[in-house]
Amino acid sequence: MREHALPLTTREARELFRQYTKQSGALSSMTQYVSRRQRCWKLLKELDPKIELSEGHRADMLLDLAGLDRHEKIMAQASVNNARTFERIADALILQHPRVHLKESRRTSAGKGNETCASRD
């Protein structure tokens, strides 16, 4: 039944992964950014259970795509003693930069209508 209902899951999973790894524009808060990343990973795993990405790589991507400058990333890493787990990095980002994306949203144009899993609330 699942194959009949979702015949394009492999292609959908590929596209979702492309969007997952793309840095998006304006986000509303770090908490929402982290939540979107978690939901996207869960959906990606549902679409393609064979996909694998290490915990460390997911943590690195979370940090790299968070919209922080080099020094802010270093501070986040230092605060978790360079642990490469998604949860530790997520907690550090939320604690240290709860509203970093609010200032980002003012710098980006409001007319960007590309809603993806990476940028959807």
Image: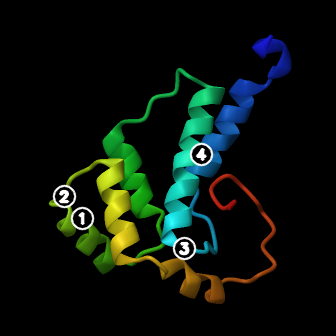
Query: In the image, which disc is placed on residue 45?
Result: none
Tell me the residue that label 3 is attached to.
Answer: 29
- Residue at 79%, 25% in the rendered image: 8
Residue lying at the far top in this picture: please name it.
1
Visual colour scheme: rainbow
* Residue contact at pointers 1 and 2, CB within 8 angstroms: yes
Q: Amino acid at mark 3?
A: Ser
> Residues under labels 1 and 2: Cα distance?
5 Å
Across and down, in percent, residue 98 comes to 44, 76
Q: Amino acid at mark 2?
A: Asn
Q: How far apart in space, not on screen, are marks 3 and 2 (Cα)? A: 23 Å
| Separation of marks 4 and 3 at Cα, in angstroms | 16 Å
Looking at this view, is 20 or 93 the one in front?
93
Counting residues from the N terminus, which is met first, the one under dot 4 or under dot 1?
A: 4
Residue carrying label 2 = 82
Which callout, 4 or 3, points at the residue further toward the start of the chain? 3
Q: Nearer the viewer, residue 114 or 31?
A: 31
Q: Position of residue 15 (x, y in %)?
A: 69, 41
Residue at the image position 69 percent from the left and 59 percent from the top: 120
Q: Which residue is mark 1?
A: 77
> Seen in the image, is 84 located left or right of residue 39?
left
| Left or right of residue 79: residue 120 | right
- Give the structural element (helix, strand or loop) at label 4: helix
Amino acid type indicated by mark 4: Cys
Q: Which residue is mark 4?
A: 40
Residue 55 position within the rendered picture, expressed as x and y whole percent measured from the top left: 34, 40
Mark toward the start of the polypeptide (1 vs 2): 1
Kind of residue sitting beneath label 1:
Gln
* Mark 2 or mark 4, earlier in chain: 4
